[in-house]
Image: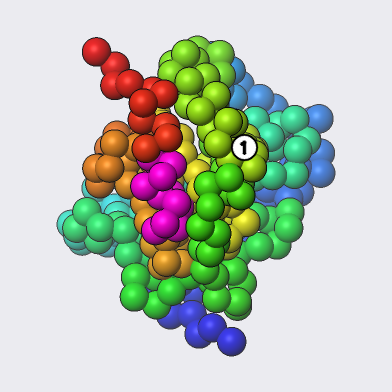
Amino acid sequence: MATRSALINVMVRAADKAARGLKRDFGEVEQLQVSLKGPADFVSTADLKAERTLRAELAKARPGFGFLMEEAGAEAGDDGRHRWIVDPLDGTSNFLHGLPHFAISIALEQEGEIIAGVVYDPVKDEMFWAEKGVGAYLNDRRMRVSGRRRLNEALLATGTPFRGHGDRGRYLGQIEAAMAATAGIRRWGAAALDLAYVAAGRFDGFWEEELSPWDIAAGLILVREAGGYVTELDGGQGMLSSGSVLAANDRLHGEIADLLRPAAPARG
């Protein structure tokens, strides 16, 4: 059985407490109050309540740490070295449509490096967690990325543009290339869970662009600690600033990158 550190216990407890409210509200999804935040980008009262709960729990346990949160934005901490990066509800559109595929994502950044992460799926009661140098786990079971070595056997996940967001032509080129070379593509609408599934070996790879730091921060360390490889689509390491992510095992990562890059040339 995996032994969780005090830090991971703090993150798990915060996620679990916020999840209680999400599960209650998910059961009454048709009655949720919803406000329009942008084109096809909704924020629910459940989202806001979960974020307040997470902030309160994390601040109580580590009062000096800063925050970067989806709704509340950035907040400096007295500590100056640590920052929580939090998405209280990744997969908001799924949640609001009654689709049981969403998660809470919490990462801890130390001087620019992600050192711990938790992604919790409250519907399935799956707690994905990782800490630098400790490994990645699903509940109490060690996770490893897929061992597949052939691209034509690989199942990939991605995110596609929706109304008012992204470059549709760019993504269509990527998807056409991936469709022709792989065993299939999935678009499930929750990047944190997509990365967690790569770490668990459920997906062989995942790519997406124009993501926010809170979408991917926890997932990055999950994949790395599960033995995977994560970069930007062009091979860089600035995922949190660029929002570009490609995650896979060490064998498939390069092949997927080679497949996608010509299909989606850099914007000029």
* Residues shaded magenta: 246-257
The answer to whether 153 appears left or right of 60 in the picture is right
- Per the image, label 1 sits on a secondary structure element best described as strand
State yes or no: residue 250 in magenta: yes
The one nearer the camera, 52 or 258, is 258
Q: Which quarter of the rendering shows the N terminus?
A: bottom right
Q: Quadrant of residue 115?
A: bottom left
Q: Position of residue 73 (x, y in %)?
A: 36, 37
Q: Quadrant of residue 133?
A: bottom left
- Does residue 3 appear in this view? yes
Q: Which residue is mark 1?
A: 185
State whether the magenta stretch is mostly helix, strand or loop.
helix
Which amino acid lies under the numbered mark 1 shown in the image of this protein? Answer: Ile
Q: Position of residue 5 (x, y in %)?
A: 43, 80
Q: Measuring 29% from the left and 36% from the top, which residue is drawn there? A: 234
Position of residue 152 relative to residue 163, above or below, is below
The one nearer the camera, 248 or 53, is 248
Q: Which quarter of the rendering shows the C terminus?
A: top left
Mark 1: few, some, or many residues within 10 Å (few <14, many ≥20)? Answer: some
State yes or no: residue 147 in magenta: no
